[in-house]
Image (cartoon, rainbow, N blue to C red):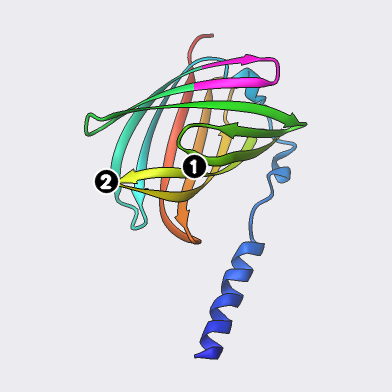
Amino acid sequence: MKRWLCGLLALFGLSACGSVDVGQYRGERPVLELRDYFNGTLDAHGVFQNRAGEVVKRFTVVIEASWQGEVGTLDERFTYSDGTTQRRVWTLTRSGVGRYRGRADDVVGEARGEAAGNALHWRYVLALPVDGKVYHVDFEDWMFLVDERVMLNRAVMSKWGVRLGEVTLAFRKRGG
């Protein structure tokens, strides 16, 4: 039993060491400037897949985004495939070169992100309501700017290090 537990802990330790560093995208173009991309109206289309890979929810999002100096507001309005709706308003603050903090009503504490090149790595804890209960789950987002209008987002949702599912989103900025 003790040997099995040590092996399991070693496996978790090794997997933590394999995390991707956002800095490796520093040379990628176009450069993602959050104040430029998240400014104006954006549309997003996404799916949530459970840990087996089954799509269990589809959704669209309309985002109204604006900045006042170093502080941005993202007003997100979700419409899910089952007809339900949700609103999340993010307040983003630039906290240094390529670094951001964020808050929203259903985010526990503060989100933290780092941008380099065309990528943003974003981590936060979300208070997620499920069947009348609220669970605090970890989100790790990776966003990649494809061109000046399109950005792709992959988020892994987990609890105590156990992967619960993934969210995949495609953002498209309106206008020219």
Count of numbered labels shown in the rendering: 2
Which disc is residue 64 wearing?
Answer: none
Closest to the observer, 134 or 55: 134
| Front-most of residues 137 and 25 | 137
| Residue type highlighted by circle 2 | Gly
**Outermost residue toward the right in this view:** 97
Q: The residue tagged with tag 2: helix, strand or loop?
A: loop
| Residue 59 image offset from top left, x and y in percent | 33, 32
Q: Residue at x 56, y 36 (%)?
A: 143
- What is the span of residues highlighted in magenta in the rendered image? 65-74
Q: Is residue 148 magenta?
A: no
Residue at position x 73%, y 31% in the image: 95
Residue beneath the point at 63% across and 69% down: 14
Residue 101 at x, y percent in the picture: 64, 34
Q: Looking at this rendering, what residue extends furthest in the left direction?
A: 82
Q: Is residue 98 left or right of residue 2?
A: right
Magenta run includes residue 66? yes
Distance from disc 2 to disc 1, alpha carbons, whole Å, reads 27 Å
Q: Which residue is mark 1?
A: 154
Secondary structure, mark 1, is strand
- Residue 110 at x, y percent in the picture: 59, 39
Q: Which residue is mark 2?
A: 132
Asked if the residue at tag 1 contacts the one at tag 2, i.e. Cβ–Cβ closer than 8 Å, the answer is: no
Q: Is residue 127 left or right of residue 31?
A: left
**Mark 1 belongs to which amino acid?**
Arg
Magenta part, dominant SS: strand
Q: Tell me the mark number nearer the camera, choosing from 2 and 1.
A: 2
Task: Say whether residue 65 is left or right of residue 77.
Answer: right
Q: Residue at x 67, y 24 (%)?
A: 33
